[in-house]
Image: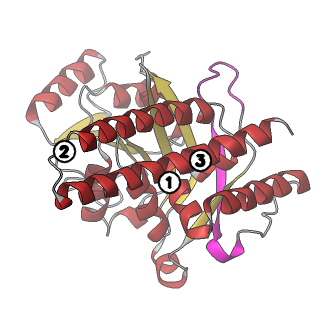
Amino acid sequence: MQKLSKRLQAAADFVTDGNRAADIGTDHGFLPIYLVQSGKCPQVIAMDIREGPLERAKEHIAAAGLGDVIKTRLSDGMQALGRAEADSVVITGMGGLTVLHILEEASEMVPDLKELVLEPQSDIAKVRRYLREHNMEIDREELVQEAGKFYPILHVIPAKPMQRENDSPVQHVIPAKPIQRENDPLLHAISAKPMQRGDIQKVQPELSDEEAENRDRMDQKLCSLLGGRERVQGVLDQYGACTVYGKHPLLRQMLERNEKRELGILQALEKGFSAADGTQERADAARMRRQEVERRLEEIRALLKMIGQESKK
């Protein structure tokens, strides 16, 4: 059986059994090999924009004896993928802006898919906001720690054409109860259901009274700490409603790392400001940059405070 890294394993776990998959940016081809060897997928299309990685993927696929069920294609994103050729599309190992470019370029095809599995490695807030504004449902998330970094993996249900016409473009995500993964304490699946922003207090039928009360309390606490719904939505886009309201066990560790990083940036800005030549333009730029960092620190500390309070309940 092909071995995968934690983040690729998390992505593979999100692919629904029996689905035909397309791996966008396949690189070495290990994910398609695992999907077939594990029995999750009857066939996979491995795609990459670069010829070199695609040739390596072909070699690995041939060595595994899977050339009949894993096809390779040179492709920029999903451009070489035919409609109805795949049920699941997996996009991992790319920056968030690249992920958004791929989704936008394939916007006519995405609604025909059953699911997307995304692992944006930057600009995560922009990715979540894009999905939310296009009525795509993040119904599960994984947060994986590997080699000192944190990787969010999103399981997304694409919006169907009728949904995109009739639904409000703004969604708020409230997670269901986390699924405990006993074999790996650093990897947890957390379910989520979409809610309209104005309906944040409504209870999903599958939530118990206690779970609904917990999420309502956490949401109100965040609104109180951050000063309103719009800012809370920005924080949820950054860290994930599944992760925040689901009390993900890695959230505190990730926030503490981010707090340390922002404090380092703030200290560097203060040193740079004191050494500046004193022009008004540089002073204004330094002041604006410092305000941005302080705002992020305030949001991090609000989440840490809420987590601390929740842990005592």
Give the labeled residue for mark 3.
140
**Mark pair 3, 2: CA separation:** 47 Å
The one nearer the camera, 220 or 119, is: 220
Q: At x 31% / y 41%, what residue is drawn?
A: 269
**Mark pair 1, 3: CA separation:** 7 Å
Disc on the earlier residue, 3 or 2: 3
Q: At x 65% / y 37%, what residue is drawn?
A: 248
- Spot occupied by residue 42 in the image (x, y as percentages of width and height): 43, 37
The one nearer the camera, 306 or 163, is: 306
Q: Amino acid at mark 2?
A: Ala
Q: Amino acid at mark 3?
A: Arg
Asked whether, in this view, residue 75 is left or right of residue 98, the answer is: left
Boundaries of the magenta span: 180-199
Give the labeled residue for mark 1.
156
Residue 230, picture quadrant:
bottom right
- Spot occupied by residue 279 in the image (x, y as percentages of width and height): 15, 56
Disc 3 crowd rating (10 Å Cα; few below 14, some 14-19, many 20+) is: many
Name the element at disc 2.
loop
Give the labeled residue for mark 2.
276
Disc 1 crowd rating (10 Å Cα; few below 14, some 14-19, many 20+) is: many
Residue 40 seen = no
